[in-house]
Amino acid sequence: MTSGPERSTPSAPQQQEYVLRRAPRLSAAVIVSALVGVVLALLGTAAVHAGPQPPADPYSGMPLSFASTFGYMVVAAVLACLVLGLLVWLLLDRRSRRTQRTVLLERTDDPAAADVALPRPEAVAPAARPAADPSDGRTPEQ
């Protein structure tokens, strides 16, 4: 057995700047918008089929079923609600950039000297995050 040169582990930087902002989640905006579109499509289909005669196909004159009307309305309503929901998300995301702040994180081993105490897994987690995740405002400033 031979022993090689000792490898020193690189220490984490003692101070690191982070930009904090409360940004809306894109996934939440998409899911809520799609659900609102489905509900609006259901209400619209129920309103169209509430009359004495069901709607008819303009080409063949055959009455349309509830399911086929609902299918067409879901496509239209979900697309429209997604566009509106993404516009609202974009406006909220732009507004959140005005309230962003830069904080300086400093590693310490003395819990009494710390402003906020993090458990060990959470203290290591910021270093493991990708460098540029646009969905959250906790990206390190390069």
Image: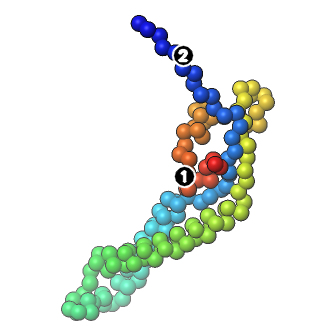
Q: Residue at x 59, y 60 (%)?
A: 24
**Which of the two residues, 43 or 24, is positioned nearer the viewer here?**
24
Measuring from the top left, give residue 73's x and y in whole percent. 37, 78
Say if 30 sits above or below 63 in the image.
Answer: above
Label 1 vs label 2: CA separation?
Answer: 35 Å
Asked if the residues shown at circle 1 and circle 2 are in contact, with their CB atoms under 8 angstroms apart, the answer is: no
Q: Of helix, strand and loop, which one carries label 2?
A: loop
Which of pointers 1 and 2 lies earlier in the amino acid sequence?
Answer: 2
Q: Measured from the top left, where is residue 101 in percent x and y?
A: 73, 53
Image coords of residue 1 (percent x, y)? 41, 6
Q: Mark 2 belongs to which amino acid?
A: Glu
Residue for point 59% across, 34% down: 124
The residue shown at (52%, 70%) is 85
Which amino acid lies under the numbered mark 1 shown in the image of this protein? Asp
Residue 20 lies left or right of residue 70; in this view the side is: right
For residue 120, above or below residue 81: above
Residue sitting at 64 percent across and 66 percent down? 94
Badge 1 local density, few (<14 within 10 Å), some, or many (20+)? few
129 left or right, relative to 113:
left
Give the side of residue 2 with respect to residue 25, left or right.
left
Toward the top, the furthest residue is 1
Q: Nearer the viewer, residue 20 or 2?
A: 2
Vertical placement of 70 versus 120: above or below? Answer: below
Specify the farthest residue to the right: 113
Q: Nearer the viewer, mark 1 or mark 2?
A: 2
How far from the left and from the top, in percent, is residue 86?
52, 69
- Asked where in the image residue 97 lies, by quadrant, the reply is bottom right
Residue 119, located in which quarter of the rendered image?
top right
**Residue highlighted by disc 2:** 6
Residue 133, disc: 1
